[in-house]
């Protein structure tokens, strides 16, 4: 065997064979998901100090206002700006919202600093004829239109299937529309989609007979109420780009977070 090995080695040397100068490159890591997401559960730090992943880490958010930090610092993100509405798209959205029967009024541009604001906000009082938004809320037209279409095309039929053919939604009770804050009301992190007018939180549904369906953990709820909540939650991802429900994390145990953030390739984050 040694003789055979020596012969093979000699053949390689004589033929001028060499090892490749570069090995295969690793596959690039997928781009991080943008938008509101459940708050991850922190891992306990090892004995003797901070978590290993934090050691030697550059402090994020340099250049941002105090308390407004990002997990990745990019030069273009150091100055947060309010997104400008495209005139034709905005006019088309208003026309569609009027056609569907929503009640709303255009209001003055909102600019609360720190990137919080809406270029062309509207104040919504009802999403459909006879279906109020309580309390009224300020948001972008695109957000309002997604909310109205979801209510008309999926939430209303689901309520009739679950609670009877005469059941009628009378109100969507919201917990938050536009508000200048960070995600999940945290002290540090990225700006919330609520601060851009892209999001609405639904806390409950009211029916015309006085019944209220509150959003709460219902994954194991075998009643028609549980089926209704799961149905409207799943269908919301057809209209919104982000859907977070009580199963997402502790921050969303009592409401549905719905937003219309734009992601690459039309990706949606729903859970």
Image: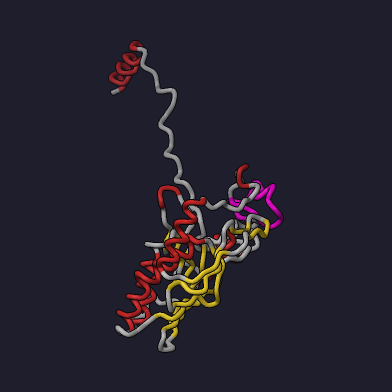
Q: Is residue 44 above or below residue 172?
A: above
Residue at position x 57%, y 58% from top?
120
- Left or right of 142? Residue 221 is left
Q: Quadrant of residue 175?
A: bottom right
Residue in front for this viewpoint, 127 or 233:
127
- Residue 121: % across, % down: 57, 62
- Left or right of 3? Residue 63 is right
Q: Is residue 177 magenta?
A: no
Residue in front for this viewpoint, 155 or 168:
168
Q: Is residue 249 above or below residue 265?
A: below
Q: Residue furthest bottom?
A: 209
Residue 46 visible in image: no
Q: Is residue 57 above or below residue 40?
A: above
The number of discs equals 0
- Residue 170: % across, % down: 43, 81
Residue at position x 42%, y 64% from top?
271
Q: Quadrant of residue 166?
A: bottom left
- Residue 199: % across, % down: 52, 64
- Left or right of 241? Residue 11 is left
- Left or right of 4? Residue 143 is right
- The N terminus: image quadrant: top left
Q: Is residue 60 magenta?
A: yes
Residue at position x 61%, y 57% from top?
189
Residue 241 visible in image: yes
Q: Main secondary structure of the magenta part?
A: loop
**From which residue to which does the magenta span run?**
51-71
Residue in front for this viewpoint, 3 or 11:
11
């Amino acid at each position: 065997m040694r003789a055979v090995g020596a012969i093979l080695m000699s053949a390689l040397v004589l033929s001028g064979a060499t090892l490749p100068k570069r090995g295969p490159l690793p596959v690039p890591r997928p781009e991080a998901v943008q938008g509101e997401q459940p708050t991850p559960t922190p891992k306990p730090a090892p004995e003797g100090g901070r978590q290993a992943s934090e050691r030697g880490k550059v402090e994020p958010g340099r250049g941002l206002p105090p308390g407004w930090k990002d997990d990745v610092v990019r030069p273009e993100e150091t100055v947060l700006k309010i997104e400008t509405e495209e005139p034709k798209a905005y006019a088309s959205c208003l026309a569609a919202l009027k056609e569907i029967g929503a009640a709303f009024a255009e209001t003055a541009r909102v600019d609360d600093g720190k990137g919080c604001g809406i270029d062309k906000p509207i104040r919504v009082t009802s999403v459909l004829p006879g279906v109020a938004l309580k309390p009224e809320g300020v948001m972008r037209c695109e957000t309002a239109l997604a909310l109205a279409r979801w209510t008309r095309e999926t939430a209303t039929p689901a309520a009739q299937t679950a609670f009877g053919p005469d059941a009628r939604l009378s109100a969507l009770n919201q917990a938050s529309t536009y508000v200048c804050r960070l995600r999940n009301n945290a002290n540090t992190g990225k700006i919330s989609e609520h601060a851009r007018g892209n999001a609405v939180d639904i806390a409950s549904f009211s029916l015309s007979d006085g019944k209220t369906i509150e959003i709460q953990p219902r994954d194991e709820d075998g009643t028609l109420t549980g089926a209704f909540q799961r149905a409207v939650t799943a269908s919301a991802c057809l209209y919104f780009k982000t859907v977070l429900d009580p199963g997402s994390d502790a921050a969303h145990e009592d409401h549905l977070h719905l937003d219309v953030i734009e992601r690459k390739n039309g990706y949606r984050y729903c859970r």
